[in-house]
């Protein structure tokens, strides 16, 4: 089986368990199944820890994945979760090998472009007209082939 590419994927937590890390620290493992696209059906595990610094992040991730509880002894909301979220997958080197890691667990759709307030078509047109002279003074765009004799390289 090949390795999943780094990227953002829609996923659902399908299982979760409490346990201990290699150094004896309490942890949670959450098994995510990708719900669509090229890697639909693939599963990856995210780990969370309960140290003073990591506790808020772990609880946020659990809630983002669908946990509604307050008792860590009851992970039923994650086994499986009915809530879709977005996992961010990265590759990391560990002991000389490339490993796949879930780096972030985000709300579904949170990676979409977000602005506090979008311009209306009229506002965009007015703004573009206001800055047109300044934009032109900064030079013409590069040609599609990338050639520009004014570049020093």
Image (cartoon, grey):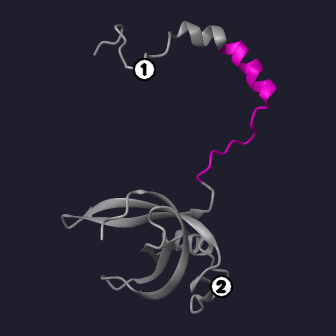
Identify which residue is drawn at 59% across, 70% down: 60
- Read off the residue under disc 1: 144
Q: Secondary structure at mark 2?
A: loop
Residue density around tag 2, few if under 14, some if 14–19, many if 20 or more, within 10 Å: few
What numbered label is drawn on residue 18?
A: none
Left or right: 46 as drawn, with respect to 120 = left
Q: Quadrant of the N terminus?
A: bottom left
Foreground residue, 85 or 35? Answer: 35
Indicate the position of residue 17 as horizontal and vertical percent values.
48, 87
In the image, residue 150 sits, relative to residue 39, either above or below, namely above
Residue density around tag 1, few if under 14, some if 14–19, many if 20 or more, within 10 Å: few
Left or right: 118 as drawn, with respect to 114 = right
- Read off the residue under disc 2: 70
Q: Is residue 127 magenta?
A: yes
Marker count (numbered): 2
Foreground residue, 127 or 9? Answer: 9
For the residues bearing labels 1 and 2, Cβ distance under 8 angstroms: no
Indicate the position of residue 10 as horizontal and vertical percent values.
55, 64
Provide the residue span drawn in magenta.
111-131
In the image, residue 144 sits, relative to residue 52, either above or below, namely above
Kindly report which numbered mark, 1 or 2, lies closer to the viewer in this rendering.
1
What is the spatial separation of the Cα atoms under label 1 and label 2, in whole angstroms?
56 Å
Residue 68, picture quadrant: bottom right
Identify which residue is drawn at 38% across, 59% down: 90
Q: Secondary structure at mark 1?
A: loop
Identify which residue is drawn at 58% across, 83% down: 78
């Amino acid at each position: 089986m090949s390795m999943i590419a780094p990227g953002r994927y829609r996923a659902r937590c399908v299982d979760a368990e409490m346990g201990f890390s290699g150094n004896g620290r309490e942890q949670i493992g959450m098994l995510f199944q990708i719900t669509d696209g090229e890697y639909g059906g693939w599963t990856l595990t995210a780990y969370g820890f309960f140290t003073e610094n990591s506790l808020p992040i772990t609880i946020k991730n659990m809630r983002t994945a669908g946990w509604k509880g307050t008792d860590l002894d009851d992970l039923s909301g994650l086994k499986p979760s009915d809530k879709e979220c977005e996992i961010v997958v990265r590759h990391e080197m560990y002991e000389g090998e490339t490993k796949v890691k879930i780096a972030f667990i985000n709300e579904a759709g949170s990676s979409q472009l977000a602005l506090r307030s979008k311009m209306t078509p009229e506002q965009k047109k007015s703004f573009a007209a206001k800055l047109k002279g300044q934009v032109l003074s900064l030079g013409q765009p590069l040609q599609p082939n990338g050639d520009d004799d004014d570049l020093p390289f």
